[in-house]
Amino acid sequence: MNTRVMLETTWRRRHWLFARLRLGQLWNYAVGAVFFAFKRERVASLPGVVKIDISPICNLACTVCVHADPNGNPALERQRFAPGHRMSVEQFRRIIDQIKGRTATVSLYTWGDPMTHPDLDEMCRIASDAGLQVHASTNFSFGFKEERLRSIVTSGLTHLTVCVDGLSQEKYGRTRVGGRIDRVIHNLRRVAEIRRELGREFPKIEIQYIKYQHNLDEVEPARRLAEEIGAEQFADFWGALHNYADREPENYATIAPRPNRALPQCYWPHFSMVIKYNGDVIPCCEHRMAAQHMEGGDARVFGNVFESSVAEVWNGEEYRKARRIVSNPEVVLAQPELRKHFCDGCFVIFDTEIAKTARWANQHRWEDVFEMDARGRPRRKAKEATGLPA
């Protein structure tokens, strides 16, 4: 991720990253920034943002995701999800108790949709009561009853991001496989209405419109809908036609580490932590995504917060190695054992051929990669037609 993209992404997420900062959280960010600037491996801060994948379960099979229909893709066929794959309330509470007062935000999703977790609202209350910003991103395609929608509004959730890939079902369903756009819009309207009825400021609502060649005509109507509903933010950006599994390191060549620069070339190891539902920790959700729930996958976790603690993992050996690598990627040439690390092969800090595994919607049409099967669901075309890994 280059500096421009990093700044753009941070700016888009500014409302739930930096709003309502308390003194301890602001100080924690400041300390982290100092250790980042000086390229320190052991840090005196805690992560400013903790992403907690409270459950990897999802109700949809979006084409970009690890939940997509495999269609013969070996990595997707090896994904394993089960109803019991979810964090308990007590496990979640223990994490919050360790990070409160210093961490600014918890974001309650990574590979799953947080709305599938039956205890989401209680978890939001726990984190909010501890003084944290509480963010959730969801497809919001659920048949929620009025009682549940009111519970979401009053739960302590401070920032709600809802993803939309079109306003008509035909266009939305090409990428949000199994979703219903009418449900999404109904739920958005009611959350905004209930929030006004109760005179509440939160949750702030962000609508993300993922652009493809086939839904460009619905961007502006969606923007007007966001304004009508009362959403605080509307963001539109180009989507991906490849799958997360296509970008696993074994699918592209890693050429060489990038040369040393004045600042570390990735901010994740200094400012963020990803905690999976079972307590396993990885440094980010941009690399080795399919490996995390793949049977026999090379997940390369950094530790487990249920077996030790957030602070111990945060300054543990694997995190220190991560900070060493992002501070100067060329260190792997002198320390080849680092090639076994999670960060090895990451396109942010290595020159790679990962671009060959990508099909971005601003350059390719949906029809270049997909076709509809007999069930009316998207099916990826053969490798020979798409140029993507099988």
Image (spheres, rainbow, N blue to C red):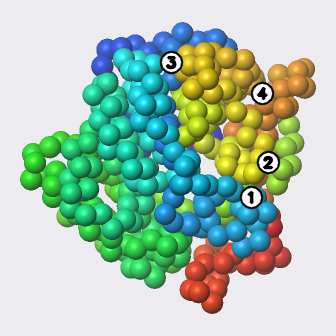
Q: Which mark is residue 78?
A: 1
Query: How much space separates mark 1 and mark 3, taking CA atoms?
Result: 34 Å
Residue 367 appears in the rendering: no
* Dot 1: element: loop
As drawn, 23 above or below 230: above
Q: Nearer the viewer, mark 4 or mark 1?
A: 1
* Residue displayed at 78% across by 42% down: 298
Residue ID for mark 2: 296
> The residue under label 4 is which amino acid type?
Pro
Q: Residues within 10 Å of mark 3 (few under 14, many from 20)?
A: many
Q: Which mark is residue 329?
A: 4
> The residue under label 3 is which amino acid type?
Leu
Counting from the top left corner in percent of width and height, residue 355 is at 74, 55
When asked about the image quadrant of residue 282, the answer is top right
Residue ID for mark 3: 46
> The residue under label 1 is which amino acid type?
Arg
Dot 1 or dot 3: first in sequence order is: 3
Query: How much space separates mark 4 and mark 3, taking CA atoms?
Result: 23 Å
Dot 1 or dot 2: first in sequence order is: 1
As drawn, 29 above or below 354: above
Q: Give left or right: position of 369 versus 107.
A: right
Counting from the top left corner in percent of width and height, residue 129 is at 27, 28
Dot 2 or dot 4: first in sequence order is: 2
Query: How much space separates mark 4 and mark 1, taking CA atoms?
Result: 31 Å
Residue 284 appears in the rendering: yes
* Residue displayed at 37% across by 65% down: 142
* Dot 3: element: loop
Query: How much space separates mark 2 and mark 4, taking CA atoms?
Result: 28 Å
C-beta proximity under 8 Å, tags 1 and 2: yes
Q: Nearer the viewer, mark 1 or mark 3?
A: 1
Q: Nearer the viewer, residue 55 or 255?
A: 55
